[in-house]
Image (cartoon, rainbow, N blue to C red):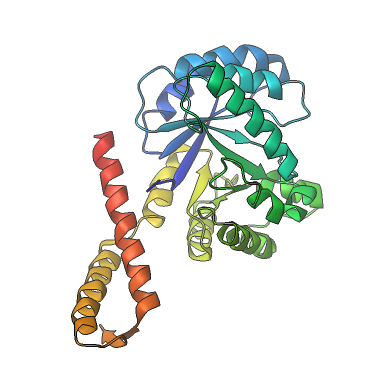
Amino acid sequence: MSIYRSFLFAPGNHARRVEKALSLSADAVILDLEDAVANSEKIKSRALVLAALQGPRNCKAYVRVNALGTPWSYGDLVAVINPGVDGVLLPKVESASDLHTVEWLITSLENERNLPKGSIDLIPIVETALGFSNLASIARSGTRVRRIAFGAGDFTLDLGITWTADETELLSYRNSFVVESRAAGLEPPLDTVWVALDDEAGFNQSVETVQKLGFQGKMCIHPNQLKHVNACFSPSEKQITHAKRVVEAFEVAEKQGLAAIQVDGKFVDYPIVYLAKKLIERANAIQKNSLAKN
C-alpha cells in the first residue's frame, strides 16, 4: 500500500535545500524544475537533480518537470528518467492526450535504459480551466497514472478566482477531484500547496478540510508543514483502537448470524467494517513505512 501523505517541494537548482528536504519526514520530495527554477537555470539544473537522486534519502523522490509545450519539457524528461527517480509530476495537464504523449516517452526511455516497465510513476497536476473540464478523461486516460493532483495556484489565476484563507471557493473543485479519482479507480488525489506561510491556523484548517473531503495527502512548500500534514493524514491511536474493536466485535457477531450491531454506542454494519479494515491497513502501512526509514 502506497503512503503519500506529504510531498515536499525543493528547488532543483539549490543543492543544500534538496539535500535537507531528502533527509526530512516527507513521504516524498519533489525536486522542482518548473516554477521554483528561473528560466536561465532550467537546463543546467537537470544535472543537479539527477546527481541528488543518486544520494542517500529517507523518502521517495519525484521530479516536477516543465509543462508540455514549453521549451524544456522534452529535455527534462529525457534527463530525469534514470535510475534513482521514483516518478514525475507533470504540471498543467489539460487532456488525456497530454498523458498519452508522456506515457509513450517515459516507456521508451525505460526500455532504452533497462528500467523495469512502468517503474516510473506519473502524477498529473490539473491546474487550468481546460484541464478541469477534462478531469474525467484525464483520470480515465488508461496510462500509468495512479493518482492526480490539484494545483490551486495556477487554477485560481486562470479562472480569476480569489484564493481566500477559508478556501470555500475551492470546495466544489476539490470534490470533483475526489469523485473523478474514485470513479476512475485511482487512488485518492493529492491536494494543492498552501502558500500563506505566516498563516499557520489557516494551513492547519486547510489540511484538516481536505483530509475529510477524501484526499490522501497534500503537497508542501516548507518543512514546517510536514508535521501537521503527516499527523492529519495518519489514523490516530483512538481511531485505530476503535477500528480494531469494530472488526473484532463484528467477527464474533457474524459467526452468530448477525450483520448489524453496536460498538461503543455506534451502529456497525458491513460498510463500517470495511472502513475500519481500510483504516487499520493504512495505519499498518504507515508504521511499516516509518520503520523502513529508520
Answer yes or no: is residue 119 visible: yes
Q: Is residue 136 left or right of residue 274?
A: right
Residue 256 percent across, percent down from the top left: 19, 87
State whether residue 92 is above or below residue 241: above
Please name the residue shown 70% across and 46% down the image: 127
Q: Is residue 235 left or right of residue 94?
A: left
User: Considering the image in quadrants, where does the C terminus appear?
Assistant: top left
**Which residue does the image show at 48% across and 56% down from the upper left?**
204
The percent position of residue 165, horizontal first and vertical second, equals 62, 57
Q: Which residue is at 80% across, 52% downward?
A: 159
- Report the residue at 56% width, 40% height from top: 144
Q: Position of residue 196 (x, y in %)?
A: 59, 46
107 in relation to 148, above or below: above
Q: Is residue 249 left or right of residue 77?
A: left
Instruction: Give 49 or 112, whichever is nearer the viewer.
Output: 112
Query: Which image quarter: residue 22?
Result: top left
- Residue 265 visible in this rendered orientation of the protein: no
> Percent from the top left, x then y, of residue 222?
49, 38
Q: Pick whichever, 7 or 188, lies toward us.
A: 188
| Picture quadrant where residue 59 is located | top left
What count of labels does the image hold? Answer: 0
In this view, 95 is above or below 85:
below
